[in-house]
Image: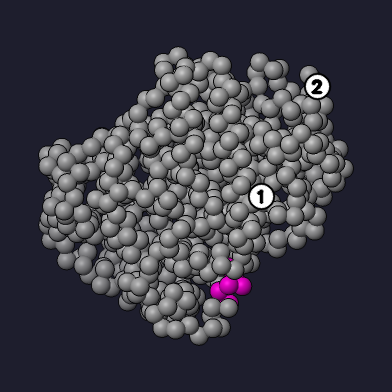
Amino acid sequence: MSRRVFLFVATAVVVMTGACRRADTASPQAKAVPATEPGIVTASMDTSVTPGDDFAAYANGKWVASTPIPDDRATIGAFYTADQERERQTRELLNAILASNPAPGSNDARIASYYRAYLDTDAMDRAGLAPAKADLDAIARIADKRQLSAAIGSTLRADTDPLNATNYQTPNLFGVFVTQALNMPGDAIPYLMQGGIGLPEREYYLSTAADMVRLRDAYRTYVTQILQLAGQPEPQQATARIIDLETKIARAHATREESEDFAKGAVLWTRAELERRAPGLDWPALLTAAQLGGVQTFQAYHAAAIPKLAALVSSEPLQAWKDWLTFHTLSQQANVLSRPFREASFAFNGTALQGTPKQRPREQLAMNAVSNALQDAVGKAYVDKYFPASAKAEVQKMAGEIKAAFARRVQAIDWMAPSTREEALRKVESIVIGVGYPDRWRDYSSLEIGNDPYANQKNAGLFEYRYQAGKIGKPVDRGEWWMPPQLVNAVNLPVQNALNFPAAILQRPFFDPRADAAFNYGAIGAVIGHEISHSFDNNGALFDSAGRLRNWWTANDFQRFAQAGRLLAAQYDQYEALPGLHVNGKLTLGENIADVAGLAAAYDAYTHSLGGTPAPAVQGFSGDQRFFIAYAQSWASKMREATLRQRIAVDGHAPGNFRALTVRNLDPWYAAFNVQPGQKLYLPPEQRVRIW
Ligand SMILES: [Zn+2]
């Protein structure tokens, strides 16, 4: 199962294609190179390159030249390196649980059952379509639009996965996200979001670009294969109906840019307004089936799309909708069905969409699947074993220092009006920083896990949905986590004014308790600064200290801020990822602002931590040099061309090798590496972007 899109509350440091979440297409596998030296890896550097000409190659050149992308991966890099360690740890943990004969009903027993069932592909092959039969029969029995509305309602799931934010749309007609309203802090309400398509974005249906046409063909083939396997008597005709329906759904969708505009999403509808504004489907039937029958207020996040989607339920033939439900029910569960389903799913989701030639071994898929489905159960065991209290304390201390450095920077801005400055300071001071793992763990006692992998996966998705729906009407918990501890990533949650730094990213090459401050502030410090800065990027700046969407800027201040953003967007527009293919400075602006401001705050916190004592030279490099090299090494990355093209088109993050070049905006980098006019990365001081 793959959980789906949520674009705006969570902003990941990086999107790891599938590494953890889309267990059916994911990958990390090659052996991690054990790091023998603490701090930066000098063997990865190509010191024949002049730092001022190509800092990414200087820091990572030998690693790039000597590290092939394994066949079952779409990308590799620093996140991959940390993820391999996470994977080794999880494997060790899982083996211990499997060998321990856990007590029935315990979390360990759930973990063991889920894993074993997921691994047993022979049983899946023997079972054929049988596990899905009840679901398919229920779809076949749908006789009218009221029953269809109920069926759509019963498939709604929680959109809780910031990791997939830039990559996938939910295949269910609507996504549901639960938190406080955008412009009204208070109790949690459900957000209704557009969904219903199987390709990643609406442009995949509408664009005439050659690679989009090719992907549409691949999708058509995939849909037909799944329907054939399901015994659909006329798979070609049914495929045509599904593609036609999804193309209409895609046309109804808000564009990506519109989706990222919170002001457009800040629309509250009462239940009566929802029914009145979006006629065409039977809302009482849908909401009851979705366990939202008692809800009176909705955040109509895609307020323009929801009525169009509802109208399609009325205007499009019942048979098209039944075909669509059949296909998506099987496609979402293909990873736990018989071999032909699994292979068809990987050929499309892994190879066609991402260019990954080979699927990962089942053991690794199973491990990631259990880690997703029972994330707090695995997470609790993970941090008990691998995340010592000393690491938590050290990172908490660094985070406090970086927060303070950020506040000092805000105080030092001369052009800002006092009212803007005051709210900015209030906001930075009230950020809730979660390090390692949440204070409270999910209770899985009502989640039944047995030896049927199809039912297990479905139950886990439903359990998550019920958990999310259960928050409606209750006060928002600002300490709630949206990432599992065993995930190499980090996230900013503007509505909660909170950050999560999972335990799995708090290790090399991001954090090394053996290394000195130069390394740790340059690597994980910059990540922490990045996430803090998201609270003040072009999106985060729209939320105040209470997580409320409101304008707390004077017009003048916002203009200054926007001007700095334009300068930065122009800087990134110049980066060429492939011949003729440039980074989109506007699409990646929020991330790039966070990189620049985060690195600057981390640098300030680093120098502050030295207390006036010069850093020692280590490994032949000064403290400042190691700070910047550690930063660039934390953005080491290599991608397959197909993946790179897809990322440039849809990902809010610039490719890692360009993120490494953030250093050009900081004056101390010029001094540390004697960067001079005429060198390729040299920027005259007035072109170095300072934001915050
Ligand atoms: Zn980010």
Label 1: which secondary element: loop
Query: Magenta part of the protein: which range?
Result: 90-95
From the image, state whether disc 2 or disc 1 is nearer to you.
1
Image quadrant where one finds the C terminus:
top right
Residue 337 in view of the camera: no
Figure check: 467 above or below 611: below
**Residue type for callout 2:** Gln
Residue situated in front as seen by the camera: 341 or 179: 179
- Residue topped by disc 2: 676
Evaluate if marks 2 and 1 touch, with contact meaning CB atoms under 8 Å apart. no
Q: Is residue 579 left or right of residue 293?
A: right
Query: Badge 2, how many Cα within 10 Å: few under 14, some, many 20+?
Result: some
Residue in view at x 56 percent, y 64 percent: 383
Query: Whole-percent x and y of residue 186?
Result: 29, 42
Marker count (numbered): 2
Task: Please say whether residue 45 is one of the residues in the magenta stretch.
Answer: no
Residue 476 in view of the camera: yes
Q: Is residue 59 left or right of residue 230?
A: right
Label 2: which secondary element: loop
Query: Whole-percent x and y of residue 264?
Result: 31, 31
**Residue type for callout 1:** Phe
Residue in view at x 70 percent, y 63 percent: 31
Query: Whole-percent x and y of residue 644?
Result: 58, 42
What secondary structure do most residues of the magenta stretch adopt?
Answer: helix
- Residue topped by disc 1: 510
Q: Earlier in the sequence, mark 2 or mark 1?
A: 1
Residue situated in front as seen by the camera: 441 or 573: 441
